[in-house]
Amino acid sequence: MYYILVWQLNFKTINGENNLLLLVEYKFIFMKKIIKISIFFILLTEMLFSSQLSVPINDPIYLFLDRMATVGIIRNLYNDELPLNRDEVAEALIKILENSDKLSIVDKNILGEYFADYRYELGSEKKWEVENNYNTYFRFSKFKNIKKDFKDIFTYNDDSEDLHLFSYEKDDELLWLDFDFTGRIETQNNSTRKIGAMGFMISSQIGENFSLYVDAYQYGQTMQNEFDYFSPEMNKPFRSTEGNMYYTDKSDAYIQYTSKLGSFKLGKEPIRWGNSENSMILSKSDSNASFTFLKWERKFYKSKFTFLHASILPKDSYIDSMSERKAYNKKYLVGHRWYFMPFEKFHFGFTEMVIYGERNPDLAYLIPASFLWCSQHDLMDRDNMMMAVEFEYFPVNKMKIYGSWFFDEMSYSKLFKKWWANKFGYQLGIHLTPKLSKRATDFTFEFTAVRPWTYTHKHSINSYTHAGENLGFKYGPNSQLWKIENRWWLTKRQILSFEYELLRNGIKSIDDTTSYDIGNDVNQNYENRNPDYDFATDALMGEIINIHSLSMNWYYQFSNDLFFTTNYKIRKIQDEIDHFVSIELRFKF
């Protein structure tokens, strides 16, 4: 067993003298087999073109960046607030390149792929063809290119950037058009359903400061049959039924202006605040409808401030007396978030939020620099105020300890007592990135607990919800979650992950014949509680249900346009066992 390492270096300047393309070609002779790995590195003194386009919060690159932070390569990335923009990701990739000697072979290959994907920001040469010197390329538009364009759909080319249906790039302007098709089959025990999605995306950068984006998707799903949950695509406020099908749709969009004063965005897209995928603070993913917001963010030295004012929906409608039509009261979410990185190994953040409604946007809540705690009191304590603190600590390379504390309401004098209004949640986790082989891996161990009645309010307009869906921890109040996850990046095109969860939920017992709630639903009114438990509210109330689940997920990039994902999960609720299988094919071009 032996290997020979051969370096082939090709240097060339691109787009000026400040950028250098370095092609490193590895040739391994291992067990008499030759393995060839090509990696493109771009060494930059500065980024050539800027792009403030958002990177979707479900993009796999966030898993890679989070792992690189734990490894110890990038520690100044604000990835506890998603989405990031393409400029921020490109800057992180440059930092990783500078420390590439710490990477495994697989990670070096992954880095090469991401450098190709962020070619525009990094100033590399275009990989796609330019037609008629107009800096454009339109796939399938020329008969002579049809064979090649169709071949590209089913071919994987190393170090190839994302191919778009239409591309226009000239100097500091770009326009990309993409189409997206997804088909998935899901089973629960002996029942099967089919889910389909199709949509388009338009991305544009206009000069150095202005960007815009829009997408539109149509979703369809066959009837539920024996399924006990909706598919993520159907978990929207609006659904229609036709024949044996459910239908829904969604469109996200934003316009953004960035300058020395910060980034100003008017948009509608999924966002997440918090240092965990199971964030208790603000966890809005593609599985729920996104909401429209106005956002301003600015970095100051070793910190970042974000102001958010969003328009959200209440759960219930009413009939307007004048028009006799269904109507919804006005409802808003305001958020201020400060995140600090005073030391390389220790970061912390503070978040304050207010839910208010049944009136026009309040000027007091439109001042980014105000302290919401005081503003809410100045407005006569009519609204729902919440706060959160969080931290990340890197004691050694390849280990991250993180945690957060979300408090909706509490009393310092009763903090360690069983008072019902100690409405808070806490989370603690460890992220490890050991080097176990030439492949890359990580482990996550996490515990989350959210007390009964957290997120609820006596006025439904002030509940921490959008269209009745919880904005915080996905399992809601009166719950605890133990989670263990292990991911393996087998190659730059394959991710294999294993996950175990133990979810403990408190629900109202069937033997409880009272009309009282027990604080396990964010839409419940906390005044409808049993006063006998006002000073006897445990961390979990009611009948405790234990839900064990073990899952395996395999992601494989079949070609530059085709993506395959399959998942198997076994779930045990008390003595009942269910099996779930999902097979998905996505075609994006």
Image (cartoon, helix red, strand yellow):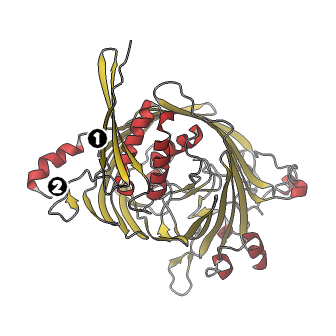
- Rendered residue at 61%/80% (across/down): 361
- Rendered residue at 18%/49% (across/down): 149
Q: Secondary structure at mark 1?
A: loop
Instruction: Provide residue 444's location: percent of width, then percent of height.
Output: 60, 36
Report which residue position mark 1 lands on: 559
Q: Cα distance, mark 1 to mark 2?
A: 17 Å
Question: Is 484 left, or right, of 202 in this rendering?
Answer: right
Report which residue position mark 2 lands on: 140
Tell me the quadrant of the picture where the N terminus can be found: top left
Question: Is 526 left, or right, of 568 in this rendering?
Answer: right
Number of the label disc, if any, that sits on residue 527: none
Q: Is residue 579 visible?
A: no
Amino acid type at image mark 1? Ser
Q: Residue furthest right?
A: 413
Amino acid type at image mark 2? Phe
Q: Residues within 10 Å of mark 1 (few under 14, many from 20)?
A: some
